[in-house]
Amino acid sequence: MSDQRIMKDYWNREGSGDKANWHIAHIDDEEEFFASGKKDLDKVFEGDLGRLKSGSTILDVGCGRGRLARALAQARPDVRVCGIDVAPSMIQSAMKANSHIINLSFCVGDGVSLSAFPDQVFDYVYSYIVFQHLPRHITAQYIADAARVLKRKGTLIFQVQGSEELMPVDPPWNNFRKIRYYTEEQAKALVAPPLSIVKVRGKGEHDLFIEAVRA
Ligand SMILES: C[S@@+](CC[C@H](N)C(=O)[O-])C[C@H]1O[C@@H](n2cnc3c(N)ncnc32)[C@H](O)[C@@H]1O
């Protein structure tokens, strides 16, 4: 079985059945689960959704069941939000749970790229608690592809799990539950032109955010 297939199958199992919310956010209750999306979305956008221009197109990479994407689409009915995830089960479940929200859509991705989208179509791309589970080279591939799908002057915001110290050994590539830790330098090194870093938040903390703008 290919590496991509192994990764897809793992997350597909996590998204199947009634434990998906737990696997995603360690919250079982459906209402609490979606309510928690608002709090985490605030971390991504620093509580300032007003910064998003009306009419913006926004991509959530590794959207799961649409926890953050729902909060964003509901708070800003004047933008369009799209979630992509490697797991068909997550996407099926996201579509079902959010079918009432008209400015929100979902699609299944290949797990290594944003090839589902043409060049320069999004104003914002964000990702929360996803890259921390991925082998580092796949995270780097996603960030490079985020630059491709972003419009000029578009913004990428992503989270990885921060560490003050360099972690000597990663978990085996196919252990997707275990975390890959990033020093600030390692996280910054994921970003290359045409992206340039405009902000780093939460150095050494659980949520280390990098914000970059496309030239
Ligand atoms: C911990 S969950 C977070 C989901 C969502 N971001 C949230 O905060 O509710 C991690 C998500 O990343 C997805 N994922 C894992 N590997 C991925 C990959 N290679 N490409 C896209 N999505 C991936 C999983 O299917 C899962 O939905």
Image (spheres, grey):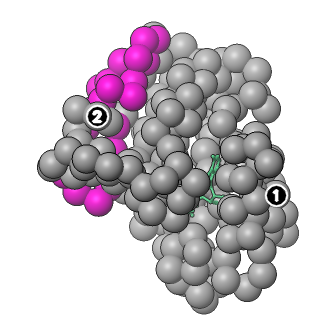
Find the magenta span and give its range: 188-210
Q: Is residue 20 left or right of residue 189?
A: right
Q: Position of residue 76 (x, y in %)?
A: 59, 51
Amino acid marked by disc 2: Gln
- Residue 109 counted in the magenta span: no
Residue depicted at 46% across the width and 11% down the height: 194
Amino acid marked by disc 1: Pro
Tell me: residue 30, above or below residue 67. Answer: below
Disc 1 residue lies near ligand 1 with CB under 8 A: no
Return the residue nearer the eye: 70 or 61: 61
Residue depicted at 80% across the width and 65% down the height: 89
Pointer 2: what residue? Answer: 186
> Is tag 1's residue or tag 2's residue first in the polypeptide sequence?
1
Q: Position of residue 104 (x, y in %)?
A: 74, 52
Return the residue nearer the eye: 4 or 123: 4
Q: Is residue 148 left or right of residue 26?
A: right
Does dot 2 land on a helix, a strand or a loop? helix
Q: Position of residue 41 (x, y in %)?
A: 46, 57
Residue depicted at 32% across the width and 49% down the height: 169
Q: Position of residue 158 (x, y in %)?
A: 43, 42
Residue depicted at 39% across the width and 28% down the height: 190
Q: Is residue 77 left or right of residue 108?
A: left
Pointer 1: what residue? Answer: 88
Quadrant, the C terminus? top left
